[in-house]
Image (cartoon, coloured by chain):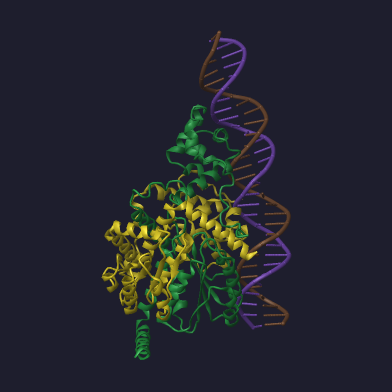
Chain colours: A green, B yellow, C purple, D brown
Amino acid sequence: MTSAKAKGKKKHASSRRRLSIAEEINRNLDNLTRTERQCARVLLSNYPFIGLEKVASFAERAEVSAPTILRLVGKLGYSGYSEFQQHLRDELEERFQTPLTKHEEPLGNTQSDDFLAEYCRCVERNLSRTVKALPRAEFEAVLLLLADPKRTLHLAGGKLTSTLADYFYRHLIMLRANVRRIDNDSYAWSEHLVDLDRRDVVLIFDVRRYQPELMDFARLSSERGASVVLFTDQWLSPVSSVASHVIPVRIDVPSSWDSAVSTMMIVEAMIAALSNRNWAMVERRVKAREKLTDSLHS
Amino acid sequence: MTSAKAKGKKKHASSRRRLSIAEEINRNLDNLTRTERQCARVLLSNYPFIGLEKVASFAERAEVSAPTILRLVGKLGYSGYSEFQQHLRDELEERFQTPLTKHEEPLGNTQSDDFLAEYCRCVERNLSRTVKALPRAEFEAVLLLLADPKRTLHLAGGKLTSTLADYFYRHLIMLRANVRRIDNDSYAWSEHLVDLDRRDVVLIFDVRRYQPELMDFARLSSERGASVVLFTDQWLSPVSSVASHVIPVRIDVPSSWDSAVSTMMIVEAMIAALSNRNWAMVERRVKAREKLTDSLHS
DNA sequence: CAGGTATTGTAATTCCCATTACAAAATTTG
DNA sequence: CAAATTTTGTAATGGGAATTACAATACCTG
């Protein structure tokens, strides 16, 4: 049973309908009466926003009465205004979120076009959306945790994301002491958990196809008083419910798999900010480390 | 009882408020309680669509109770959920009205204090430069190697870049057979080298602070007839002299360390291209793999 | 132009859903 | 560790918005 979680996507309560409402309207524009057509036109003219308002506003804008709107909605095949609106919202979200998502139909032509450039464009869009949506306060708060030498940091990730945890880890150990990489196999977890207290910070990477084990680990960490920092996608891993800080990133690309690029960018930015701010300390550490490396190899 | 009549006229009832709700949330994220913050995060992470749903849906998605949503809305300064939604709708519509200018208008705070945005900009520049400079023929040639099931792939990386090798590896094993991860410590290398022949492909990640060991490994591989594919920075690792294919990427960021984001983007694009082209085969493999996983866990 | 039909708005009704009151739970504090 | 305070969910309530019934109006059609 892999699909335990239902929360992922509740989408499309009534997804039997595949046509967009705009198309639907165009198809039976003739079956409509004069005022109904008027409503339809008003809706289409700045689709779909008026449809999201209350019936009364829609009616006023179309200069008709409320029941006319309802009749139109009925003729379009909806059982009520709510259902109609729900469909509009789903449509809008789908269009807005990812006009290019997962492995659907239009892949035949990838060869001919410049796939790489296309992929890059998606990644860039992910980056700017991520940066735009990320609360700076959250970013700063995490930086504060990372910069505090009295706190021990623990990094964990899922099947694919553990790579990111690893990337973060390798940089952090250059910047400071007390950084631990949490092994991917969950048998060793109790070793980590037993020592956790409110001084500790647990950084978890978890994107969709969320891994239940990570949730367990996060919960236990949080119960022991540790601060949990979560790096996740825009739909938020369940871990977010116990996390003290959440960094959501965009992961949409025209691929069967998700992109980790945005996450990596945030991780790098954190490392950069951290080392820029405490450069004196970091430099001392790097120097000492190099000296030790030399001693070992000579 | 009190007359909230003023809104009778449909003109933007609360247009005095100029801050977007997203900004508003970011500002008083600290005044919020834990569950309220959770709601706020859920809203921000795919803004603003959940806010357009009914309270119940929003609450369910955020895994809190309806009143919590209402309290959040209250704290943000709205007299009710309707007013809140109205504002979201207005915002959304306004954003849509100006589709072109929207890209970078709110840069009131940029240069000076927004380090994250600055970092992101550098990364984006790296990405486009990388894509622009990369010979498509080289990209394609590597894809051909990766797609050939008769060839065995070996992945190796340096101190920091081995993370990328790892990321690549974890995806490749989902796509095809005969993929090997070369351990980071050089004592085990001879094990790999001894079996190499002209059928084999060695993928090496090496960016500046180039590691001499990697050069050794590359040379030996090449001497045994293997194809060497190199991912490196714009200044080219010495490995390039023995490589049959070189993928150079940009790594400049305002940090003491280099950025691996561009490299990761290329890696992901290769994986995406690969699985898009051979989807039938890949799908079979993924299915079979899932079945096995289930068998193991049951 | 009269009678019939289709269309539309007004006004009453119903029902959903935001709201609120209150109790339980969690957290903080002495 | 108990009391106080804050936070949160449950369940009841009220208001407002969707819906419906019906009358008024427009539109045919002979």
> B265 or A174: nearer the eye?
B265
- Residue A126: x and y in percent read 41, 59
| Count of residue discs | 0
At 59% from the left and 53% from the top, the residue drawn is B57
Residue A59 placed where, x, y %?
Answer: 52, 37
The C terminus of chain A, quarter of image = bottom left
Quadrant location of residue B130?
Answer: bottom left
B175 in relation to A179, above or below: above
Q: Residue at x 50, y 39 (%)?
A: A21
Question: What x and y, as percent, mark residue B117?
Answer: 36, 65
Residue toward you, A75 or B24: A75
Q: Is residue A135 above or below residue A117?
A: below
Q: Please indicate, yes or no, whether residue B58 appears anywhere in the rendered image.
A: yes
Q: Decide if residue A197 is in sight here.
A: no
Quadrant containing the N terminus of chain A is bottom right
Picture coordinates of residue A240 (x, y %)?
A: 55, 66
For image coordinates 37% across by 64% down, the residue present is: B199
> Left or right: B95 with respect to B129?
right
- On screen, residue A47 above or below A241: above
Quarter of the figure with residue B155: bottom left
In the image, B14 versus B200, the foreground residue is B200
